[in-house]
Amino acid sequence: MLLWVCCFGARTAAATDLTGNLTDPEGQLIPEATIHLLRRANSARRETKTDAQGRFSFNGLDGGEYRVTAESPGFAVRTETVAVQANGQQTENLRFTRLTSSNESVTVTAAVSDGGVFEPDPAQRVMIRDETLDANPGRPGMPVSIPGMPVESPAGGVKPPQYFVPGVAGDHGEPIAMFFQVGGYLFPNNLPSNAHGNGYADPNVVIPVAIESVQTDGAAFNVREGNNSVNSSITFGLRDRIDPMIRLTGDHRDLNLVAGWSPANPSNRTWMGAEISLGNGYLDRLEHRKQFKGNISKVFAFGRHELTVYGIGYYGTAFQPGLIPINTPVPNDTIDARQHEETFNGALIFNDVWHLTDHRQFQFSGFYRYYNLDVRPNFGEGLIRQSEHRNANSADILYTDRFSKAVSLLAGVDVRREAPRALNLDKADATGAFIPDTSNNLTINFYSPFVGTDGTVFHVLHYNAGYRLDQVTMDNEDLFRPTFSFNRAATVSSPKATLTFLPPESASFLPSVSLSYGQAFHTDDPRIGTTAIPGGTLVAKARAYQLVASKTVSKTELRLTMTHVTTAQQLARISNDTGLQEDEGPGILKSLMFKVRHNFPHGFVQGLFSKADARDRLTGLPTPEAPRQIWGILATVDKLPFHLLARGQYEEVGRKPLGDGFVAVPVREFHGAMIRPFQSKGFDIGVNAFIVSGYGGQTLETLALPGGGAPFERVTGFPLKSYVSASFTYYFRRH
């Protein structure tokens, strides 16, 4: 049975002692077993043995999320994730099972007491992969569904899916930062000045079974998060082992195959995985999608060093249907059958954690990435082609030291280079041949030192303060308009601070409350607009305020988050007609999110509601395409008749303004799964359903249909389709 643990408001500032006992499936205590402890935030590890009575203990832990692993000859490895509360003493008992070697995870909802020098944002929310992915396996392009963050994944997932947060016009992802956590390193997954958007983030490259957790936060309050961290960030936590398995998911239109492998020796933290996705999507226009992924991870431990290496390879191609008028029949669901997308990229990422002591460490990190994109859309004014290829590399150093409960220090520097080449926009002529329209070679350099401090004082106040300095240089070689070429630099100062009140034991009826302030930015696109002209800016700055209150009543967590973000004028979105950047802002965003969650022995249920208002500060007009209202329900049940497991999520995105008095139609979707494990035979079978109404990618276009008369402005989107699929998963090491 899964161990469901929920971490709620801390009562004191004392370090926590984690104790427990380890038993076999019959309840007998197991001595001399090895217990490993990992803190995900900074990759810090500890190890102990159970005593003659099967007991173990770890002393002096900070509050936060930890992974506990038990190993003993003759038993399958047992791995559980627990949320350690900063309350002085905590007991977590472990029990072996003979039936599976799977890494069984729990749900952790981070409380304000989990904050630390690595995770300063008290509004962070941690969702374990198994709860959300099981509701939509095999859905290409979307590795995980994040409650409260709607996702749109057109073109069968070859085009990167876009996540949205309340009130944010997240067109092409530029206000939202995305990271892959490799060891203790946050690999930045955004692509500044991408051919198809300013700051595209592409999670397609990760195999879904590699994701152990997803964490979201406000981004502006964390000194480790720089470019694109205006409104939010998403961090995918990756596993260091996976079950050897193969999973086949499909229906009459699509087929998805995932395979993974890890060595039998549990101390060998290595895995390899591959995914193949083939199909035609669910619209009338056949996509002819082909998607191939390969991921490999290896952790080397030598002395006080722990080196994590992660490799990624990806290729995808598909014919994308494109935007069509909503509620208007269009033959084959496309206005241009030539619309197509092709992309391939690869990355090598490494992180070396040098544990000087239990509370002091260096981290040396970096990556090399190659990326290529060729996308051919038609938004009503003819076919265009947006293309580029780029090399990106980075080197990073980080130092942390925990002097006492009252003072921890974090300091580091990031050095990164992005080099998009042949960043081109071409337009098709009457014969279908592409004629060059714009072409740029860019070099963008980031030099970013940062420092932060964190601690608890007076037993009831937790503080975090930091400062980040980003020096950005951009060399823009405009191949068609030489007078628009430039070499320019900008410096961004980003102070950040959070103060949290932790109610003492004597006032346990009070909620935990935190206040945060931070500054953030993202780089502008240089191809046109305010960046290209003399005196233009390279970066768009933002200021963010946040209030978080949380309280647990009768084992039910209540959480309220309010945010206020102001943004400078920015090159914020791609014009669907020209393929070039458009100027927006300055803007103001106010949002409120309320979440309630209750865990029970065999599952949980969670409800979420958010409402936002986003406007242009000069005109007072609503920000186009920003979601105004989102609400949803997520639930899992792991003990049903006939040994069934159930996963389900319902989400609704209300009407959002599109500009010129137009509003979008609501989007309502339910995705769920019913899974039947056959543990003794080593396989699972499942039925997965996606039931949806509405349109994705809703926007305004001046569009004429073939043979439909003169073009006029109307609401367009791509129709969302329901489907039912089946899955079969075979585990090679189940008895």
Image (spheres, rainbow, N blue to C red):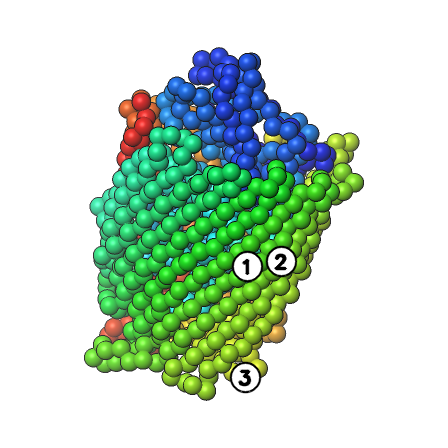
Q: Which callout, 1 or 3, points to the residue nearer the camera?
A: 1
Disc 2: which residue: 450
- Bin the neighbour count of mark 2 within 10 Å (Cα to Cα): few under 14, some 14-19, many 20 and up: many
Disc 1: which residue: 414
Residue type at mark 3?
Answer: Pro
Secondary structure under tag 1 reads: strand
- Bin the neighbour count of mark 1 within 10 Å (Cα to Cα): few under 14, some 14-19, many 20 and up: some
Whether residue 181 appears in this view of the structure is no
Disc 3: which residue: 534
- Residue 86 spot, x, y in % from top left: 66, 34
- In the image, taking residue 641 as reference, residue 626 lies left or right, namely right
Chain-order first, disc 2 or disc 3: 2
Question: What residue do we see at 35% from left, 47% from top?
Answer: 295
Residue type at mark 2?
Answer: Phe
Residue 127's label in the rendered image is: none
Chain-order first, disc 2 or disc 1: 1
Quarter of the image containing the C terminus? top left
- Residue 59 spot, x, y in % from top left: 64, 29
Between the residue at mark 2 and the residue at mark 3, the CA separation in whole angstroms equals: 30 Å
- In the image, taking residue 384 as reference, residue 574 lies left or right, namely right
594 to 695, vertically: above or below: above
Residue type at mark 1?
Answer: Asp
Between the residue at mark 2 and the residue at mark 1, the CA separation in whole angstroms equals: 8 Å
